[in-house]
Image (cartoon, grey):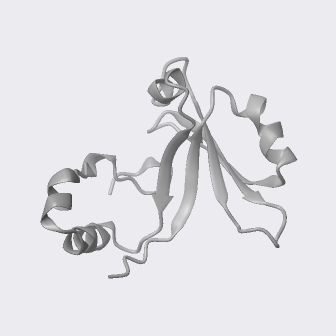
């Protein structure tokens, strides 16, 4: 079964975006868009490759808006990978299809907390 869930971006936790941005620019990434999401308590910057010959990955660099925020546990554990965001027309249908594609044991091991399912900009589904 094809779930048709293309990856939109990979979220990367940072202490401070401006301190890490030059690494990504050196790798050939350029700014696509930036935002502040007060609901989730983060500021973000979307980056894409400037080289059209390379795969077009989109990264989302994130930093907390406040001294303490949602990225703290990741940063304290030296974990940069914060999330993978997928594109879908219907998250409910995609989750239903995901469960339908799993065998019984994997269904027992998979938990999906729908309270974390947000639209872009932090709007709850």
Q: Position of residue 63 (x, y in %)?
A: 60, 32
Q: Is residue 60 above or below residue 5?
A: above
**Residue 107 percent across, percent down from the top left:** 17, 60
Q: Is residue 49 above or below residue 114?
A: below
Quadrant where the C terminus is found in the figure: bottom left
Which residue is more in the foreground, 72 or 115? 72
At 56% across and 52% down in the image, what residue appears? Answer: 10
The foreground one among 39 and 3 is: 3
Give the side of residue 109 with respect to residue 33, left or right: left
Q: Quadrant of residue 32?
A: bottom right
Left or right: residue 65 compared with residue 18 = left
Query: Residue furthest toward the top?
Result: 67
Quarter where residue 105 is shown: bottom left
The percent coordinates of residue 48 (x first, y second) are 73, 59
Which residue shows up at 45% across the image and 25% down it?
73
Residue at 71%, 68% (x, y): give it. Answer: 55
User: Which residue sits at x=55%, y=63%?
Assistant: 8
Viewport quadrant of the N terminus: bottom left
| Residue 79 located left or right of residue 104 | right
């Amino acid at each position: 079964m094809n779930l048709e869930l293309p990856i939109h971006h990979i979220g990367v936790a940072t202490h401070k975006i401006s301190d890490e941005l030059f690494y990504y620019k050196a790798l050939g990434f350029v700014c696509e868009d930036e935002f502040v999401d007060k609901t989730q308590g983060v500021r973000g910057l979307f980056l894409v490759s400037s080289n059209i010959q390379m795969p077009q990955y989109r990264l989302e660099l994130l930093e907390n808006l406040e001294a303490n925020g949602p990225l703290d546990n990741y940063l304290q554990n030296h974990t940069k990978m914060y999330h993978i965001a997928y594109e879908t027309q219907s998250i409910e249908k995609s989750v239903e299809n995901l469960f339908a594609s799993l065998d019984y044991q994997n269904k027992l091991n998979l938990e999906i907390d729908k309270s974390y399912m947000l639209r872009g900009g932090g709007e709850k589904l």
